[in-house]
Image: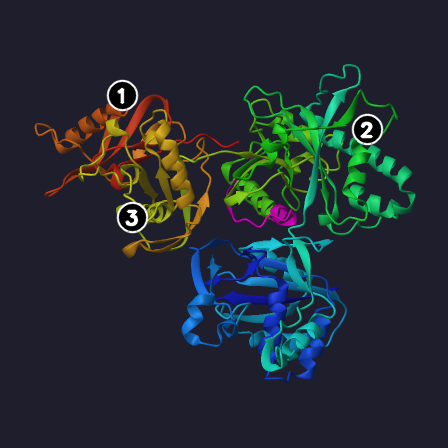
Amino acid sequence: MARHLVFLVHLHDRFHGMAFGAPEWPPSPARVFQALLAGVGRGKGTPAQSLDALRWLETLSPPRIGAARAKLGTEQLLYVPNNDLDAKGGDPSKVSDIRVAKRLIPRLVDTRVPLLYIWSWEGATEHVAPLVEAAEKLYQLGRGVDAAWARAEEIDDAALDDLLAAYAGTIHVPSLEAGARGGLQCPVPGSLDSLERRFHATRIRETRIEGKRATAFENAPKPLFRAIRYDRHAALHVFELIDEFEGSRNYPVGLRFASKLIETIRDTAAERLRNTFSTQINEIERVLIGRRSDGSNGGPTEDRIRLIPLPSIGHPEADVAVRRLAVEIPGGLAISSEDVAWAFDNLTPADPETGELGPYRLARAEGPRPMLYRYAAPARTFRSVTPVVLAGDTARRRIEPTRRREEAKGGQERATEESAAAAAFHNALRHAGVRARVDAIRLQREPFEKRGTRAEPFAEGTRFAKERLWHVEVRFDRAVPGPLVIGDGRFLGLGVMAPVEVTPDVHAFVVDGGLVERPSPLDVTQALRRAVMARVQARIGPRERLPAFFTGHARDGAPVRSQDGGHLLFAFLPDNASLLVMAPHVVERRAQYGWEHDYLAVLDDALSEFRELRAGRAGHLALRRILVDREAHPVFAPSRTWLNITPYQVTRHAKSASAHGALALDLALECSRCGLPKPAVSPRTARGVSGVGLFGEAELRFEHPVSGPIVLGRNRHLGGGLFISTSPPKQN
């Protein structure tokens, strides 16, 4: 079983290291190696067991590195002496003549997330304890201004999986390619000896120039390290399916046959490689089929070549047929990338059952590849084009078609199934190497594309049960690069995700903890409004005026009205402890104005890491982002009957009517003003508040189902007047 030595290195708040003239990130393993040596060093002496441990460490393969998100700080230009004062006769008053400019660009880091350096090996060793002790003595990382502290621990495979699953940063994996410019310096055998030679080297020596004694300065010998490229580069080749009979056009394959298509092409290409490279059959089987020639496990999935179908998307009427596929070849394989690409070029796949050559061939795409960009573009939101195969206990309960009514699923059963599938999807992301935090997940059987295909038909001809297939929409806390392929079927053309340019107009959060019992909805809503404005202000800059779209107030302090464009609306649902931030066009039931899109993009960025809310008397809330299913959520689901769950404040009090009558009349007028049909209003309570106005609760009943949100009244921008549907649609 493999063992892993994990160094957890904490920086104070920034990092100044430079490499190749640019700020280095993450800090290289060589810096950690030097920092460990500096920590255990005592003058010119270093404990023998520490030296032996470091010599052992330099023999290991380059480590995996974990690093949190970091951003560049403000560049500073410093003028410092260049240590050549003797050129000016040693006169300190002339130091200004030898100053040179040095750029300093700090990288600001998230101090809550440590850097990880994970060295792995097989078998037992005695060198771990000295290295764990050395980590406790580490005091800086690289330059003297980069204060740091660290700890280390030895863990097994299971503990490492848990660590990586919970890690909030990005994991960088070393490739087998060495010496590449821009790679990170890593220790190799001989690194420790080179550092010792550098430390003990004579840097000042006496010499004679024209018969006079002089001092000469010499550079110390450079340390020995090796540059390793991280985030393993993968070559991506695109091939088109060309009709054999009409060579000028593409050959479309139905989306539901994507898995069979990929398997047929893969097996035919593997056979071509076996016939050409007969001495590398094991490697071909391992990286292309996923197993060795003896049937044993093929090793790390990071070495696998992926064949990714690229269905035609980008327009609502696109037929979503497969006309192209991408071949992703990881670097560092024993077989070169070009040799693998050759195996697919001009390939005519053969039917695995009949041996008949297909009616199409593959041709390498040249020039611009717009369809690839539709899948490879970085994005925060992705939707499945081919369904994701989820592992574990994620299969939906199958219902016999003739007994759909008798065995229909209730809402609780459906929620339980989707919860298990969501947990499995998190694991699938981890297995695919996606470390970004998930903000929200939506699972369904129906496709997201207008002309897409339901999940179940994709299981035909595969080893996967159709109940394990799900269409998924996922939203991350930051942009993730594509192409993104997830799940157990990711090497068979399933789980292909397409990036979606979505700027949400509704942000929803659920409170996971910290909420006091029976909080005031208005208190929570006010705290939410203040927090959102503060986060937006931090994004646009402290000196920029916060737009009325976020504040609800014009430059002169007057409230913004609907005819002026409106502003954000905030709501709190006490029953399920959830928060909503809604764009004005959603509440006002109108089309989005063009200028609102930019504001919504700023809002989306500002709320990307919204994890907690200090709500005063209501508590210190821990938040989790969720996606809103507008067909089922009580604020949005169509219904004939609506009931307000936060106090409604009348806009104008009809003085000649009773309190209940005034409430009913005002609600009817508010519905008309907001473009809603005229409802039958049934007041339930009405009470006056001195100096404020009339408040109450009421039920609205429409002749036909109406979709939400319905937020009415004078206090609707302060959390009041929120209605929910009392007869949501049944979930089958």
In this view, the mark in front (1 or 2): 2
In this view, the mark in front (3 or 2): 3
Q: For this rendering, which residue is in front, 438 or 222?
A: 222
At label 1, the amino acid type is Lys
Which of the labelled discs sits on residue 2, or is there none?
A: none
Question: Left of 436 or right of it: where is 636?
Answer: left
State how far apart marks 3 and 1 are (Cα).
46 Å
- Tell me the SS state at disc 2: loop
Q: Mark 3 points at which residue?
A: 543
Q: Which of marks 3 and 2 is nearer the N terminus?
A: 2
- Tell me the SS state at disc 1: loop
| 441 drawn magenta | yes
Q: Residue at x 60, y 68 (%)?
A: 32
Most extreme residue toward the front is 210
- Tell me the SS state at disc 3: loop
At label 3, the amino acid type is Arg
Which of the labelled discs sits on residue 347, or is there none?
A: 2
State how far apart marks 3 and 2 are (Cα).
61 Å
